[in-house]
Amino acid sequence: MTRETSARALWIINGLTLLAAVIFLSPVLYSIWMSFQTSDAYYSGGVDFTLRNYDVAIGQYNFARYLLNSVIVSGIVTLLGISFATMAAFAFARFEFRGGNLMFGAVVATLMIPSHITLIPNYLTLARAGMLDSYAGLILPAISSGFAAFFLRQYIRGIPRALDEAAYMDGATPLKVLWRVIVPISKPAIFSMGLQLFIAEWNNYIWPLVAISKSDLFTLQIGLARLYRVNPGEDVIDWPLVMAASTITILPVLLGFVLVERHLVRGITMGAVK
Amino acid sequence: MLRKLTPYLFVLPLLGFMAVFTYIPILQSVNLSFRVWDFMSPTKPWVGLDNYRLLLTSRDFWNSLKITAVFALISVPLRLALALAVASFLIRETAVSRITRGAIFLPAVTSTVSIAVVFSWVFSTDYGAINGFLQMLGFDKVSWMQDPQLALYVIIFVNTWKQLGYDVIIYTAGLQAISMEYYDAAAVDGGGRFHVFRRVTFPLVMPTTYFLLVISVIDAFQVFTIVDVMTRGGPAGATDMIVNMLYRVGFTLFDIGTGSALAVLLFIFLIALALVKARVIGRRVHYDS
């Protein structure tokens, strides 16, 4: 094989690979395209570009509110979850204290616990506290991430202790050392974990399904499932409208994904392969 | 004095919320699994093992277990084989393989509800992409999600499509960790691509395979969202996974005792699997250091 033909073969392989990637994503890509079509055009096989589906999803079906709910809930879960995990990770990595190992063991044990065992009791707890159908009910059960704490503790242990000690010499408190020394150095790890918490919460389905019945508090996932289900059994689902709602649900993660894919991949492979 | 308290204050928020929403609930689930309750009655009479007995003699439970096991038996090897093939093909760090890996990874971080809705359209009988294609080729429409023989395979397909990218990412990391020396040695020995794969790549990537095997079995026993959106366990229970049954028993039939018993059984099974996983990871970390 001459050099020239092998270069051409490489082009063909690359082209076919990219084509396969497009075919792989085609259902999602087509659903986005479909969301910009009028119903009439879609069902008659024509093409008629419109933004009306988004207007209807956002206005009539309240998806602006669902979007806001998802942003608030995922945002707060991420912020609190990563804060608690970082604080605990710092203590586990840097302090010798009575019961410390046992507590760390208890945190690591939660990595094995399937969330479904807590479904019914958490429902009861929040019902008793009057917190069903509230942001608190969506947020509180999700803010203790054993995985983030475990992962960040491993990371912090890799940071030289000399840095802490220098800061303590200057009279810093533990909280200052955490905030001024550990957090800045751990930024990549904290960012990766934060992304994972955000995505997991954004896509969370079973808990909001159980905890929320008021439509004002629906997250995007619940809103979308309901919108799609309003129609089953009917002859005609308004697919372009459903796809507009679906696109609103996917889009924030889709856009963010392009920017942060590397961090995400690093977090996942560090957690799994290492 | 304050110095001594410091570490406790740092772990308090995490452990406090874990206590309320993880540790105590496990005990509550076990407790409730021995009682009869409907969310409403003022009393929760103790019935011992009755809920478990009821569960183990009910057709629904064995059907769910069978469906979930069939799902795991088909989808796990499928995921792993596809992922290893794709990861091997895209192993070189070129722009094209990076973009393609990104495209395959995308569904793994995308909303499962959206994916389930989009594929409900893809497989829909009257307007779906697949039936449209079949009709173009002159075939009849197929009722993918209404046919008990087919619905489970549709769910397996969609789940595989969603999870594949995650497995590919992990396999890619595993493959890239294999030292080139092994391949050089294999090249000296001579032997084709398949030979190298069988003798070098496959055995050396075995720890990753083992890890993914356990992870994906754990995943398989927790599948819920795709089924809930696409088929709701139907038609005729053909896609009724364990968690779908748990949700139905607990939150639509309000049978807390049976629901809790089911949760406890699932919990015990998954903890056993997780312990296997912990051993796999433990051994690997040990090798590394």
Image: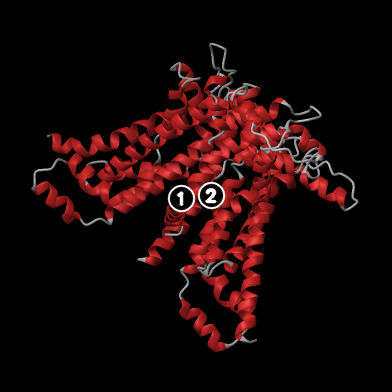
Q: Regarding mark 1 in the picture, which secondary structure is present there?
A: helix
Q: Amino acid at mark 1?
A: Leu
- Which picture quadrant has residue A86? top left
Between the C-alphas of marks 2 and 1, the distance is 35 Å
Q: Which mark is residue B273?
A: 2
The residue under the point 50% across, 83% down is B184
Within-10-Å neighbours for mark 2: few <14, some 14–19, many 20+: some
Q: Which mark is residue B85?
A: none
- Which picture quadrant has residue A210? top right
Subunit under mark 1: A
Give the image location of residue A75, x and y in percent.
42, 34
Within-10-Å neighbours for mark 1: few <14, some 14–19, many 20+: few
The answer to whether B147 is drawn above or below residue A229 in the figure is below
Quadrant where the image shows the C terminus of chain A: bottom left
The residue under the point 86% across, 50% down is B136
Residue carrying label 1:
A259
Callouts 2 and 1 on one subunit: no
Looking at this view, is B75 or B33 the one in front? B75
Looking at this view, is B66 or B80 the one in front? B80
Judge whether residue B161 can be spotted in this image.
Answer: yes
Give the image location of residue A216, x and y in percent.
54, 20
Q: Amino acid at mark 2?
A: Leu
Give the image location of residue A2, x and y in percent.
63, 87
The answer to whether A273 is drawn above or below residue B16 in the figure is below
The answer to whether B122 is drawn above or below residue A24 in the figure is above
Total numbered labels:
2
The residue under the point 51% across, 45% down is A255
Subunit under mark 2: B
Q: Regarding mark 2 in the picture, which secondary structure is present there?
A: helix
Label 2–label 1 contact, CB within 8 A: no
Looking at this view, is A155 or A18 the one in front? A18
